[in-house]
Amino acid sequence: MTTVTRSEFDQGIALTRHAEEPGRYDGDLGAGWQIGGGVNGGLLLAVAAHALSLEHGQHAAHPDPISVSGYYLSASTPGPATVRTEVLRTGRGLSTGTASLSQDGVERLRVVASHGDLATADGEVRTTATPPQLPPPDQCIGIEHAPRQLVEQAALLERFDLRLDPAAVGWALGQPSGQGRIQGWFRLADGRQPDPLMLLLVADALPPVTFDLGLPGWAPTVELTVHLRAKPAPGWLRVVHATRNLAGGYFEEDAEVWDETGRLVAQSRQLARVPRGQG
Amino acid sequence: MTTVTRSEFDQGIALTRHAEEPGRYDGDLGAGWQIGGGVNGGLLLAVAAHALSLEHGQHAAHPDPISVSGYYLSASTPGPATVRTEVLRTGRGLSTGTASLSQDGVERLRVVASHGDLATADGEVRTTATPPQLPPPDQCIGIEHAPRQLVEQAALLERFDLRLDPAAVGWALGQPSGQGRIQGWFRLADGRQPDPLMLLLVADALPPVTFDLGLPGWAPTVELTVHLRAKPAPGWLRVVHATRNLAGGYFEEDAEVWDETGRLVAQSRQLARVPRGQG
């Protein structure tokens, strides 16, 4: 007998094809991915994109999410979840479909996404973007230094090996920089190496940038779109989150994810609601 | 008898509620909005968001698009079009729904969007974004100076009063800057003033930033998300389009739209395919 140990992330996004309903996949949202009572929005996006990867795998060789847009409809909870997919178009380079993630008949997340094959991507790169400058991981701030109150509300932090840039954690000491920027190193605690589905989690893994504006509390995501730009190399990821415009009760949060070779592997933007009340 | 003259844009996005099919709206994509044989992607997004504005108007006071994400499935052509909407959630501040725009039974565009009411938006603004520096409109480059070949392929340019920053039009003279940035002043030629639906058009109205990288030709949009951040004041809009990462056959294009008071009224990002062949 062999014991196969799956990574926590692969367990988190595991899906079973429904025997009788075409396009349906069933999963279980683990309690380990909770943040503030709900399940992390990046993990939900990865679950939905995973269902579409499986669905497009049947019809076309388009296993990788290339662009994934999710609208968050209601707060998800740990437990069973159903993803219903619909293929809208199967093209030569991209397949596009929708995924609806629901629990007990209540829709949590609606996704539209295009999948393709990052392994066959044209090699040309012309970029003016530069990776964030960070001290090495062992000079950054790990979760062991995070406020107790934060960690208790965020089981998912135990799944992460997250090391924040000391220059961007003043908020944890009551001294937010006001710049609206948080950055650091990221890898999964159990050593699972990055791939495109995991990057969907990473794009929403850091604390909300509103912390750095002196606005603590939950910042519910309205919409999150992630563009996957290359297959990530194994190793650490560098992640930077920033906002430039908080107005009318909403703010945008842009994330970039860079791999250990210095390649920009994912870009994302979300619109989120400004936290109410506290701080 | 009174003759009511509607603006070209309002005619372009006009919709009739279908008498028998709930959630269905019928329109007509005018030939005047063509670019390179297809209908402009920003106009299509405005048509789809308009249908959802009408649909949410029936159920909730959420007339304005706040976040609109569109996936482009096939090239649209001038002529009749049908938009089928589905309301996913009606909340206190936002209503979320999907819109599918099709022609002759072929889906052109799938949209998910959240609508709300920008008139009642919380007034707080904290922004580090700054408007693009531009010479005044009369010192910028109008369409009358555009290459004949470009204008012939783009009927929609006649609807626009677009004045590009002279520093960002080297590509039109065979000398692209290589920076991946195009900016200028925008208003509609017939004087129709900006509103949130019009901003969806504006976010995709400038030439593709790939022109400024020395890559002329059509850059098909995979996905376009626009966040509406405030009601625009009457007058000129300042628009800047930029890309930072062209890789693997795709590039992102970020647009910002600023109104005449210097307020950031829309932010957008799209993923588009690098033009093939020419140049």
Image: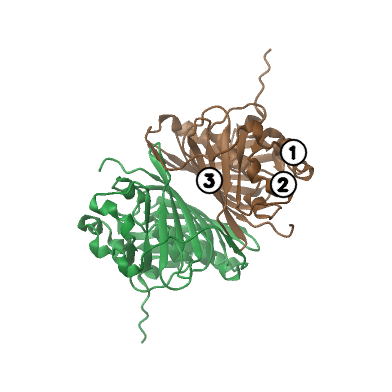
Chain colours: A brown, B green
In x, y percent, where is residue B71?
45, 49
Badge 1 crowding class, 10 Å Cα cut-off, few under 14, some 14 to 19, many 20 or more, is few
Q: Which of B85 and B21 is in front in this view?
A: B85
**Secondary element at image label 3:** strand
Label 1, label 3: how far apart the Cα atoms are: 27 Å
For the N terminus of chain B, the image quarter is bottom left
Residue projecting furthest to the bottom: B1
Q: Is label 2 or label 3 in front?
A: 2
In x, y percent, where is residue B21?
49, 61
Tag 1–tag 3 contact (CB < 8 Å): no
**In the figure, is residue B101 to the left or right of A44?**
left
**Secondary element at image label 1:** helix
Same chain shared by disc 2 and disc 1:
yes
Sequence-earlier tag: 2 or 1: 1
Q: In this view, does B270 lie above or below A266?
A: below
Q: In this view, does A45 lie above or below B52?
A: above
Q: Name the residue under label 2.
A: A172
Label 2, label 1: how far apart the Cα atoms are: 9 Å
Quarter holding residue B149: bottom left
Look at label 3 and name its amino acid. Answer: Ser
Same chain shared by disc 2 and disc 3:
yes
Tag 2–tag 3 contact (CB < 8 Å): no
Badge 3 crowding class, 10 Å Cα cut-off, few under 14, some 14 to 19, many 20 or more, is many
